Image: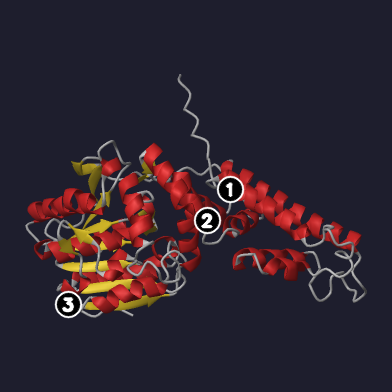
Amino acid sequence: MTPNPLPPPRLGPRPLPLHMAVEGWILQMSLAGLLPSSSASSLSKPNPLALLAANLPASLRAALQDLMAEAGLSPASPEPGSAAPLNPASYIDAISREATQRMETFARGVRAYQAHPYRRDLALPPAAWRMGAASLRDYGGPKNAPPVLFVPSLINRAYILDLAQDRSLLRAAAKSGLRAYLLDWGDPGDAERRFTSGDYIEGVLIPALEEIKTRSGQVPRLVGYCLGGTLSVAPAVLRPDLVSALGLLAAPWDFHSGTEASRVLMDMSRPMIEVMLGAEGVASVDMLQALFASLDPTLVGRKFRGFASLDPASDHARRFVELEDWLNDGVPLSGALAAEVFFTWYGSNDPLQGQWKIGDRVIDPGLIGCPTLAFIPTQDRIVPPGSAQILVDRIPTATAHKVDLGHIGMVAAANAPLAVYAPLLDWLQNPASKVRA
């Protein structure tokens, strides 16, 4: 008997060397304000947070403050339980022990995640239609029901919209009486490595809508998530005959809203990014994950220290692993599209400035005439609420619906079916109606 093959090893949290370096950096920087400098008096009246604050990002400064609090130290009272002058040796010992413990807990959490027995066994439906690397997956529903095409971002796997039996927007749509289709972008092949946003829209998204219209005899509804929402604006402008209603889930439009630090990082990194895109033809998964990590460099450390304390057999632990596996199961992004998004969207803010064109047509959301509903998660760190709200403001037929969730939580959290799926699917049945509160 042939033994079952071992599952592939988990590589995450990706890129692991970066996250390990951040944890080690916090340990080193927690001591930096106390180490002797050219001044012999540097240990006699140090205030580590004051010395570091001028040059630290807010998230890292907060991490050091948390570390000091957990060690029983504070800038006002540098030794636990004492207002006496600072004893450098005891301070260094306390902060070093606490930082080392945090790093060891992080490592324990990573090892527990990598060894967890959960493996995804929820299969995607077979492809009903293909166009290059992309495929159309039919989730079923009543034969004559209104068809809906769901469009995820190109950066992660499409199954974020079908994460688990109890958190699947696609399966919920089919059960609600809609004919649900998922556009799975797939991994970019040789042709897709040269694709711009226009190539994806004219060569994949619009043909997928045409295929659904031919199959059903009805004009489909269109729902886009994250960058999939931004892309979905284009066919609603260019081909209104193919879009009877438009749903937007955390779709960015103002790429400068709340992204000042990220734009500075992108501008500094541009020469290196251009070289990497030119050499590889794609933005690799680890490159994309590193850019996301720059939004909150300490997030992964906090998550995995928390995971280290969970019972591996608990439902909470399984759900953590389920979502982390998706996060680390990334998709490379076409080099041409990556350059467009990084440098003309996040760099020049072309969509907001009316400079985003497909062919010779400006993608002007003011031209959209179909009913439109936009869900805006108020806790979103990836697409700040203001970035999505301005798109609502520019579509004459749009209504905004705010939900108290984060960017991924709006489609994958335990309460997403009630907070997002139910009102969205009710509205898709009758887009002329008001969204359910």
Q: Is residue 151 left or right of residue 378?
A: left
Among numbered discs 3 and 1, the one appearing first in the sequence: 1
Q: Is residue 326 visible?
A: no
In the rendered structure, find residue 18 and report the number of the disc placed on it.
Answer: 1
Residue furthest to the top in view is: 1
Q: Residue at x 34, y 45 (%)?
A: 335
Q: Amino acid at mark 3?
A: Ala
Label 3: state its secondary structure.
loop
Seen in the picture, residue 399 relative to 237 is either above or below; the reply is below
In the rendered structure, find residue 432 and report the number of the disc placed on it.
Answer: 3
The quarter of the displayed image where residue 186 is located: top left
Label 2: state its secondary structure.
helix
Q: Is residue 95 visible?
A: yes
Label 1: state its secondary structure.
helix
Q: Crowdedness of circle 1 by 10 Å Cα count: few (<14), some, many (20+)?
A: some
Residue nearest the viewer, comparing 20 with 421: 20
In the rendered structure, find residue 219 and report the number of the disc placed on it.
Answer: none
- The residue beneath circle 2 is 293
Q: How many marks?
A: 3
Q: Crowdedness of circle 3 by 10 Å Cα count: few (<14), some, many (20+)?
A: few
Among numbered discs 1 and 2, the one appearing first in the sequence: 1
Gap in angstroms between the C-alphas marked 3 and 1: 48 Å
Residue 180 x/y as whole percent: 23, 57
> Do the numbered discs 3 and 1 sit on residues whose CB atoms are within 8 Å?
no
Gap in angstroms between the C-alphas marked 1 and 2: 9 Å
Q: Amino acid at mark 1?
A: Leu
Q: Nearer the viewer, mark 3 or mark 1?
A: 1
Q: Amino acid at mark 2?
A: Ala
Residue 386 x/y as whole percent: 39, 75
Q: Is residue 282 left or right of residue 46?
A: left
Seen in the picture, residue 386 relative to 313 is either above or below; the reply is below
